[in-house]
Image: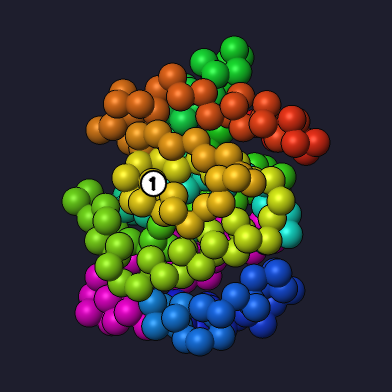
Amino acid sequence: MSGFCAALDAFLASPAAASWRDLPVFADGTVMQACAAVDAERDAGHVVAPAPERFLAALALTPLNAVRVVILGQDPYPTPGHANGLAFSYVGPAPLPRSLVNIHRELGEDLGAVAIGRGDLSGWARQGVLLLNTALSVREGATQAGSHLGLGWRAVTDAILSAISQRRPHVVFMLWGAPAQAKRALIDESRHLVIASAHPSPLSARRGFFGSKPFSRANAWLVEKGEEPVAW
């Protein structure tokens, strides 16, 4: 398989897409247009993350009808080899990405336990935690964060968040950073909980991410609504 358009076709043909493929953005060409824009970037010589077959990994691991928490960031890690299609997750050798280190620090302080410090967050995804970014791709490189925010992903992630808000009964939306918080109007806050804070990036974590206690707040609210807490 090569390219984001081909990866999209493969995803839509797979059982993993069953709960997502009826979203209009998959049928009307919106997602395909974004994928074509990313493929044009690759054709122009830019290295793009994540690998094409991973860009919808968050949807593949967390079906729409299982979503209980959404963790929304900005875009994939731009550092070569870091992005794997699950927001903030990392599978690779030490050291962990700095945003993930800060997430583990807050997790440990929030829950009063020593954070394990693992990079792979797929265990969260399998519990109904959708690890999503506002853009599903990025150019690789130290200065490339946000480079694909204008390539058409906004309509795609808007549609995903709107569907979750409309179809799921009780969801915690963790909106980390300004691009994520810009999606707040899509969420029905009479039914769902929004926890908005600064991004866990080293550039902003001290401006409101540290001390926000998102993990304990999410679990307390889920239990209040009769849902199982997440094993963070």
Q: Looking at the picture, which amino acid does disc 1 mark?
A: Gln
In the image, the segment drawn in magenta is 36-63
Looking at the picture, how far across and down is residue 200, in whole percent? 38, 34
Frontmost residue, 95 versus 72: 72
- Image height of 127 relative to 43, above or below: above
Disc 1 on helix, strand or loop? Answer: helix
Q: Is residue 54 magenta?
A: yes
Residue in view at x 56 percent, y 80 percent? 24
**Structure colour scheme:** rainbow
Camera sees residue 149? yes
The quarter of the displayed image where residue 229 is located: top right
Residue in view at x 46 percent, y 70 percent? 156
Looking at the picture, how far across and down is residue 14, in whole percent? 69, 77
Frontmost residue, 188 versus 136: 188
Frontmost residue, 111 versus 122: 111
Other residues around mark 1 within 10 Å, as few (<14) / some (14–19) / many (≥20): many
Residue in view at x 68 percent, y 61 percent? 167
Q: Is residue 101 left or right of residue 67?
A: left
Looking at the picture, how far across and down is residue 227, in whole percent? 78, 38
Residue sitting farthest toward the front? 190
Q: In this view, does 123 lie to the left or right of 204?
A: right
Q: Is residue 48 magenta?
A: yes
Residue in view at x 47 percent, y 86 percent? 29
Frontmost residue, 21 versus 224: 224
Q: Quarter of the image for the C terminus: give it.
A: top right
Mark 1 lies on residue = 181
Residue sitting farthest toward the left? 143
- Image height of 167 relative to 207, above or below: below
